[in-house]
């Protein structure tokens, strides 16, 4: 077991090293330029996300699809991932994390567009789409579509399910001394009640849960920033200086300079917002939308909320807290978030606890849908019920066992998911340009395809 764990640990480090970071960020920049900066329409996307295209083809509303994607995306990476980036790359990592989100909006837009463009209707009238259908229908590479689905299933059972369940049970035990098995039983029942209703049940719960958890966490961060207001200017200055300095500046807090800040900031940003990984377009394909570009705009707002807003706020909270409280050791990695929030008596730990629990639970729901569609592509609807039983069992198992090795395996699967998806984005960029020019820049956004 130690040899297996070492293998996946090394493989994870290789897959998420500089080559993957360069490829992902390069795709973000390439699509941003080729599509003429669709980021300019981000507020149009936000407006569309709360409107109904109910008379259009699809299984759920655009907001329901966005909420489900956000449920899977907004998770421990937004809270713990940012802390890890700061501990390894210094405060400058916050800016690089944010920039990865700004450019990643174009990639998330592109994923949503292809998902709707190449989606298909099944015999029972439901919509199926995602990178596997773009690979099969657009590039005629069914073998690569199959590989994408296999990687998705394993990634989902790991980071999307068991790891999230473990985060919740651990938090409940540390905060309220509730035994792991009790948390596991409660989560198993709640997840089963939701996922056996399919995408409509998942979207309905996520449409309620996601706005609550996001608003609660954002308000909490803003309150802490008001309390740390005296250090906000210094924090912003330090973040910018250490992000672009070739050497560490301002003492040990500034990290290892430009390259280190870039590596960890971009890596955590990409991991957090999932732009380029191919997960979110699976649910985007189920949206009721008039044309692919409308849903593409709505999908792109997911990266905006996840990284440009939530990760940025988390980063500012952590850096201002480190400056305000000299006893906080910023090298503590994942514990850095807990140490920073604990400085705000009662309120800080409450924000962190509720945030982590709701973020992790919603991630389980969102990723359950991704895995279900991958399973359905591989074996049809006849095995969906069996898959759901396996998913529910994984929730309980994840709550009560040590998952150190699962983290590394799931990290590898996430990276391997991205490769087929990036191939579809790059090789079908001509389709992206054609659709974008027609609907977005051609003034036909309200037309039905």
Image (cartoon, rainbow, N blue to C red):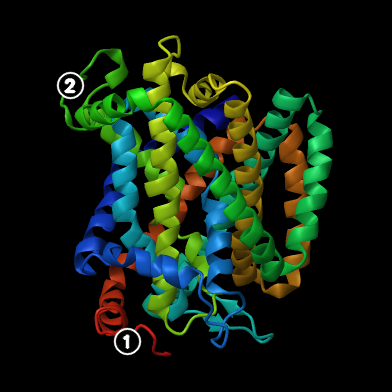
Q: What element carries label 2?
A: loop
Label annotation for residue 406:
none
Query: Residue 397, percent across and down?
Result: 76, 40
Residue lying furthest top: 327
Q: What element carries label 1?
A: loop
* Residue 104 visible to an observer of this rendering: yes
Q: In this view, does 123 lie above or below 358?
A: below
Q: Name the residue under label 2.
A: 247
Q: Is residue 352 left or right of residue 23?
A: right
- Label 1 vs 2, first from the N-terminus: 2
- Of residues 37 and 191, the one nearer the viewer is 37
Residue lying furthest left: 246
Q: Is residue 287 left or right of residue 35?
A: right
Query: Residue 228, percent across and down?
Result: 41, 25
Label annotation for residue 444:
1
Query: Residue 374, percent across and down?
Result: 59, 65
Q: How far apart are marks 1 and 2 (CA)?
A: 49 Å
Q: Residue at x 64, y 44 (%)?
A: 358
Q: In this view, does 254 lie to the left or right of 267?
A: left
Q: Residue at x 51, y 48 (%)?
A: 413
* Residue 277 visible to an observer of this rendering: no
Q: In the rendered view of the protein, which quadrant contains the N terminus? A: top right
Q: Which residue is drawn at 73% across and 45% down?
A: 395
């Amino acid at each position: 077991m130690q040899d297996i764990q070492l293998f996946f640990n090394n493989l994870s480090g290789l897959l998420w090293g500089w080559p993957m970071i360069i490829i992902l960020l390069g795709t973000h920049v390439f699509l941003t330029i080729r599509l003429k900066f669709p980021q300019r329409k981000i507020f149009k996307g936000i407006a569309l996300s709360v409107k109904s295209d109910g008379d259009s083809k699809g299984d759920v509303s655009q907001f329901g699809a966005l909420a489900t994607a956000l449920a899977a995306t907004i998770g421990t990476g937004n809270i713990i991932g940012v802390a890890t980036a700061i501990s390894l790359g210094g405060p400058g990592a916050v800016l690089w994390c944010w920039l990865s989100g700004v450019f990643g909006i174009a990639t998330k837009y592109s994923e949503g567009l292809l998902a709707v463009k190449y989606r298909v209707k099944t015999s029972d009238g439901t919509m199926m789409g995602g990178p596997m259908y773009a690979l099969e229908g657009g590039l005629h590479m069914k073998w690569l579509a199959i590989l994408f689905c296999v990687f998705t299933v394993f990634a989902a059972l790991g980071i999307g399910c068991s790891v999230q369940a473990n985060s919740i049970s651990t938090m409940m035990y540390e905060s309220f001394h509730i035994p792991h098995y009790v948390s596991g039983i409660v989560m198993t029942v709640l997840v089963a009640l939701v996922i056996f209703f399919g995408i409509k049940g998942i979207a309905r719960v996520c449409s309620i849960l996601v706005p609550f958890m996001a608003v609660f966490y954002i308000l909490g961060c803003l309150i802490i920033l008001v309390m740390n207001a005296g250090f906000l200017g210094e924090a912003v200055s330090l973040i910018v200086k250490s992000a672009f300095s070739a050497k560490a500046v301002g003492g040990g807090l500034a990290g290892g300079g430009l390259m280190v800040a870039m590596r960890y900031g971009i890596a955590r940003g990409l991991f957090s917002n999932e732009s380029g990984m191919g997960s979110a377009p699976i649910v985007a394909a189920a949206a009721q939308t008039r044309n692919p570009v409308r849903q593409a705009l709505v999908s792109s707002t997911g990266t905006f909320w996840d990284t440009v807003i939530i990760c940025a706020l988390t980063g500012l909270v952590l850096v201002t807290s480190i400056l305000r409280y000299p006893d906080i050791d910023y090298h503590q990695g994942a514990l850095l978030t807990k140490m920073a929030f604990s400085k705000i008596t009662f309120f800080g730990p409450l924000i962190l606890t509720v945030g982590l629990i709701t973020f992790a639970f919603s991630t389980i729901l969102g990723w359950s849908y991704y895995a279900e569609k991958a399973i359905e592509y591989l074996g049809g609807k006849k095995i969906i019920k069996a898959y759901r039983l396996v998913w529910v069992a994984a929730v309980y198992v994840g709550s009560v066992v040590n998952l150190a090795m699962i983290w590394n395996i799931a990290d590898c699967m996430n990276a391997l998911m991205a490769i087929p998806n990036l191939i579809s984005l790059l090789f079908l960029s001509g389709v992206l340009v054609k659709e974008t020019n027609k609907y977005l820049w051609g003034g036909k956004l309200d037309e039905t395809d």
